[in-house]
Amino acid sequence: MTKHEIAEVLEEIGVLLELQGENPFKTRAYQNGARALEAMEADEFSARMIAGTLGELKGFGEALVDKIGKLHATGRLEFYDKLRAQIPDGVIALLDVPGLGPKKIKALRDQLGVESPEALAEACRAGRVAELAGFGDKTQTKILEGLANREAYGKRHRWWDARAVAEPIVHALRLLAGVHRAEAAGSLRRNLETVGDLDFIVAADATAAESITGWFCAQPDVKEVTARGETKASVRFASGLQADLRIVPEAQFAFALHHFTGSKDHNVAMRQRALARGLSLSEWGLVPEAGEGTAKEKAERGESVVLADEAELFARLELEFIPPELREGLGEIEIAEAARAHGVALPRLVELADLRGAFHNHTTESDGKNSLVEMAQAAEGLGWQYLGIADHSKSSVQARGLDEERLAAQVATIRAFNASGRCRTRLLTGVESDILPDGRLDYSDEAFASLGLDYVVASVHSAFTQSEDEMTRRIVRAIEHPRTTMLGHATGRILLRREGYKVDLARVIDAAIAQRVIIELNAHPSRLDLDWRLWRRAAERGLMCAINPDAHDTAGLRNVEAGVRVARKGWLQAVNVLNTRDLVGVLRWFTARQ
Ligand code: DGT
Ligand code: CA
Ligand code: CA
Ligand code: ZN
């Protein structure tokens, strides 16, 4: 097992022991061990495993070292297997209910015999949870909300995960005999932050259809085939993600692709536009509204307008081409119409290749998994001109946040690294400062002055349950701090796991615009925060964006792709995104803010 996998097992052991009511010292030993492993350089870990010197480090007692050794050598641990077998799956599932931790779960189990989400819902509805010591009406309501969220979350998947499943399938489909074109349509193609199911559209020879559906249903990840016809199939993968496949004749492809890309609202508006021109638009084709039979029959009789691709469909309806990510029925058709009428293209949306660096990244100094040098080299590999280092600040104790002294040392290391000329990517000195519950930043004005950082990302990491008004005033106060360059993950949401904290984003955006403070678009596939739905109007009003990967390892730098995807969905152009500027432009922005 790798260091990271071992850390995950230790972390889980800590949680399982907590569920069983073990004493906090014991559970914390595992959790601290997991964190220490995560923070350790891979080379050091390997060396210590070989030399048998892990136990020399603080926090690694004999029992822990023994377990790590077994996992490292064999990938198994009897202690863990036994522990896991003692706890019912339903109790493990309770850990996914937002707002429930191991302690509460233990109380529910001991006092109400609750051992599954279903049993918990019943106990809440009967009012029995509210009666427990330490719970009350408010907590019971919260748990019911959490259960409802958990159910909704279970039906969708992160865009990033859905894409990882879809991409190899699309590539493989294109290589099958008789296939002319293949695309993943639906919400995935629209870059929606979460995806319900995948929708594959394939243009193929009729004679090949059966073997294509056969291939699709026989994919190794397919757990269940839920429907199967000659030109259609639906499957469910082991992850729970479902996928529809439709095979159409080449001539129908543009219409089917457009139809199944959606969104529904966009399609409704497109159909109305066609009707206004005496045409009926559907997945089958674009046929005259008048005449005998259904749209399908008309298309099959060859009455459809013949179009090579989607671009021709938009042109036929007197529209500029609308990229899939803008097809949400949010006024894109009116804009495409005006653009067409005036002979101008739609705005050129920001692209991955426009990015020249990013600002919110962690290293092993706080809770990252790669060192400063490794992160710099990875950024150089991506062709980035600069990489901002923003480790956690001192109040984020569990993330090993940096006090003034350690931060000063990191700044010195970064300056020396830049001066050494080892790397074409220039490192920038930043910090991700906690926004304290009262809105102050995590370092004094004097400390900031002596540190001389290039920039500051200010983020909320604690006291999530403040009232909306308190949270709004807290964040606005942080934005008004002259050292704040950008606001990190504006709502703290974790997609499909936890809702954001309550905050009046209109007021936060107003303050950011007034102060020339950037709001980040956190590109972590679980965050994508600030939400794309707010960006279009905010950017029009002058809000500057930074697409930040919030990378905790070198691979995490690639998160920016997810960020660019939703930035496009928010109509953002390169000019709206600070990290499309070159180093000089970025440094000028930082200086102007200070
Ligand atoms: P999802 O899967 O929930 O993330 O969202 P979509 O947009 O992928 O929805 P899905 O898979 O149900 O259907 C794909 C597209 O097909 C959808 O965006 C629009 C089109 N579509 C499906 N059902 C209908 C419908 O009843 N009416 C209209 N106008 N379009 C539909
Ligand atoms: Ca879908
Ligand atoms: Ca579907
Ligand atoms: Zn953060």
Image (cartoon, rainbow, N blue to C red):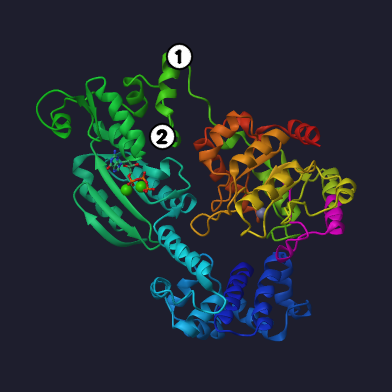
> Residue at horizontal 61%, vertical 29%?
541
Q: Could you tell me the amino acid type at mark 2?
A: Arg
Whether residue 306 sits left or right of residue 196 in the image: it is: left
**Proximity of marks 1 and 2: CB atoms separated by less than 8 Å:** no
Whether residue 502 sits left or right of residue 303 in the image: it is: right
Local SS, label 1: loop
The residue closer to the viewer here, 365 or 424, is 365
Counting other residues with Cα less than 10 Å from the Cα at mark 2, is it few (<14), some (14-19), or many (20 or more)? many
User: What label sits on residue 542 in the rendered view?
Assistant: none
Residue that badge 2 annotates: 327
> Residue at horizontal 59%, vertical 43%?
505
- Looking at mark 1, is its residue's CB closer than 8 Å to ligand 1? no
Residue 186, placed above or below residue 516: below
**From the image, which quarter does the C terminus lie in?**
top right
Q: Quadrant of residue 59?
A: bottom right
Magenta part of the protein: which range?
388-412
Relative image position of residue 316 (x, y in whole percent): 31, 20
Local SS, label 2: loop
User: What label sits on residue 343 in the rendered view?
Assistant: 1
> Residue at horizontal 65%, vertical 52%?
471
Asked whether residue 246 is in view, the answer is yes
Residue 264, placed above or below residue 19: above
Counting other residues with Cα less than 10 Å from the Cα at mark 1, is it few (<14), some (14-19), or many (20 or more)? few
Task: Please report whichever mark, 1 or 2, sits nearer to the chain's N-terminal start.
Answer: 2
Whether residue 114 sits left or right of residue 257 in the image: it is: right
- Residue 253 drawn in magenta: no
> Residue at horizontal 74%, vertical 65%?
397
